[in-house]
Amino acid sequence: MTGTVTPAELKTLFLFEALTDDQLAWLAERGTAQTYPAGATVFAEGAPAEAFFVLLSGTLALSRRVQQDEVETIRTDQRGVYMGATQAYLRDDPGVPRTYLATMRAISECQFFVLPAADFGTVVREWFPMAMHLLEGLFFGMLRSHMVVSERQRLAALGSLTSGLMHELNNPAAATVRATAALRERVAGMRHKLAMLADGRIEAEQLRALTHVVEPIIERAAKAPELTPVQAADLEDELTDWLDEHQVAAAWDLAPIFAAGGLDRACLDEVAATVGPELLDQALRWIGYALETEQLMTDIEDAGNRISTLVAAAKQYSQADRASHQWIDVHDGLKSTLVMLTHKIGDEIRVVKDFDRALPQIPAHPAELNQVWTNLIDNAIYAMDGVGTLTIRTAREGDRVLVDIGDTGPGIPAELRQRVFEPFFTTKPVGAGTGIGLDISYRIVVNRHGGDIGVISKPGDTHFQVRLPITEPASV
């Protein structure tokens, strides 16, 4: 449905309220009032940008195509909002593609003041030449700046995570190398001691009895409780006294090994009764090598498991070889992010995980959500300056899943809370932050997943709360 708009009606719109009567008359003559029913597509992304639209009444929605998904970016009923052939006509250049940058649909019946694109270009360039040049510089400057900073932020985050992952992988890898070298020495020592036992003409029954004693000792060592430093020192003193009493050489070297393995005087008495005093020194030394060998193999196994865990976490975090959009358990991404940030969390931050394991899977882009978790957890670590409690809680709130990331930092002042999601706004000192981490998180949560993100804060208790739908957002 098409109609006309009077100059007086145009003057009620904030976009045109400062224009002269002649200018208003010029617009009214060239523009029309057009009405679209609810559900209609007013214009489509990528189509030729033929008109400039100003909302007179109704509710509209703008969406953009991101890969294979249609993402709603704006929904509004504010009278006077404008869209359509805008930035494509900042430059009067035939080489500039004149296409709509988004799709606009009418949520309810909408009426627009519609101005042909060519007339809009004339208005911008001839009526406001200085403003047009200023806006052009501002728009393209901010666009380039945002692209450069966003890319730098992603590269910095990737570099930090990669560095941390390499550090975490280096520790168990180095431990494996050290343990393997030590194991080789202990095995050689065991062969040497076994030969000495044989040279000592140990009876077959004694050797058989000794091996029967050693196996329970090794099993006992595997189950030995971890001792406090005081308990360990007391047991070492007790075992040293026993070894000295039985004239065993290097008692100070063997006692810590036996104490760590959970041996006591009764166990050593059993060994002494089995092999006799003439072979006791070599037998205990052999048992010491056996205990150390088992411990070294356990260390190698632990290091290997740690490497496997880190590799699995890195694969989960990056979502390698997985679809970009899938149904996920939100806890998988949270856990892999914590592993990736282990080097930043350090030893002085206590991590509390309060997970609701009954939560359903949700539709999501997991790699993008992992970026959100990284930004929020990294900010929490920074806020606590390396000391405090990091709490990650999940719960269900109606038809949404809540992920709450809390810290015990100084908090965010009330006057700044409304600005934390603004692009380029940061409370960190120069060089410590780009100010787009939370902006990116907001866009991922709200625009890409149809969720919401907010913050509540007081000194010593700050929480960033992300809510994600448990069903696919309804398409408009």
Image: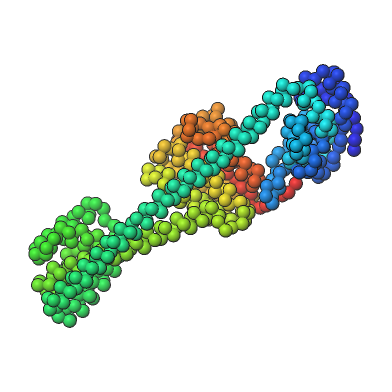
Taking depth in this image into account, of 126 and 292 the one nearest to the observer is 126
Taking depth in this image into account, of 364 and 140 the one nearest to the observer is 140
Q: Look at the picture and state if 199 lies above or below 146.
A: below
Q: Look at the picture and state if 7 lies above or below 317.
A: above
Q: Look at the picture and state if 174 lies above or below 376.
A: below
Q: Which residue lies at the image location 73% right of the left edge and 33% below the top edge?
A: 87
Q: Which residue lies at the image location 67% right of the left edge and 31% below the top edge?
A: 139
Taking depth in this image into account, of 452 and 396 the one nearest to the observer is 452
Occupied quadrant, residue 181: bottom left
In the drawing, does residue 438 fall left or right of residue 225? right
Residue 281, image x and y in percent? 13, 68
Q: How is the image coloured?
A: rainbow
Q: Which residue lies at the image location 55% right of the left edge and 56% below the top edge?
A: 320
Residue 325, image x and y in percent? 63, 54
Q: Which residue lies at the image location 58% right of the left edge and 55% below the top edge?
A: 328
Residue 107, image x and y in percent? 78, 42
Total of numbered circles in the picture? 0
User: Does any portion of residue 475 appear in the rendered image?
Assistant: yes
Occupied quadrant, residue 247: bottom left
Q: Look at the picture and state if 19 lies above or below 371.
A: above
Q: Quadrant of the N terminus?
A: top right
Residue 177, image x and y in percent? 33, 59
Outermost residue, bottom side: 204
